[in-house]
Image (cartoon, rainbow, N blue to C red):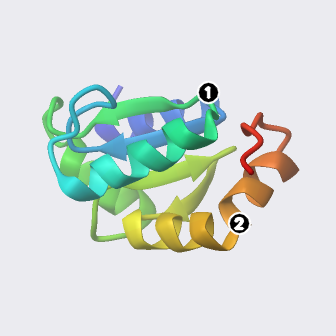
Amino acid sequence: MNVLEQIKNDVDSNDVVLFMKGNRQFPMCGFSGQVVQIMEYLGTPYKDVNVLEGDGLRDGIKEFSNWPTIPQLYVKGEFVGGCDIVREMFQAGELQQLLQSKGLPVKQTS
């Protein structure tokens, strides 16, 4: 399986996937860390993929999404965005709505 097939498989077989530098326990960049904080706060289950681990994964995900930066968040096979987009959507309540509209659990926040 090549890198793009591996990425497609991850995106297709998981409801929510975060391609990031590092992992959720140990993010290797501030932007990845911010998205992890948002996802943990929302309590929505997700798969984290460390793009620094596999050969070509870092370039492959950029090619797959045609998006130049990491992290990248996918929900139900759809590319949502990077750190800025995810943060803005979260602050506006749009990320929570998107996740719920796809039938995914979101912790109720006050």
Q: Is residue 2 above or below residue 98?
A: above
Write down the residue under mark 2: 93
Q: Which mark is residue 13?
A: 1
Q: Is residue 69 above or below residue 26?
A: below
Does label 1 or label 2 sit earlier along the sequence? 1
Instruction: Give coordinates of residue 93: x percent, y percent.
Output: 71, 66
Tell how many labels.
Answer: 2
Give the residue at x 27% y 58%.
31
Q: Which is more foreground, mark 1 or mark 2?
A: 2
Tell whether 81 sits left or right of 2.
right
Q: For the residue carrying disc 1, how many other residues have a C-alpha within 10 Å: few (<14), some (14-19), or many (20+)?
A: few
Q: For the residue carrying disc 2, how many other residues have a C-alpha within 10 Å: few (<14), some (14-19), or many (20+)?
A: few
- Amino acid carrying label 1: it is Ser
Give the residue at x 21% y 48%.
58
- Describe the element under mark 1 as helix, strand or loop: helix
- Residue 16, by quadrant, is top right
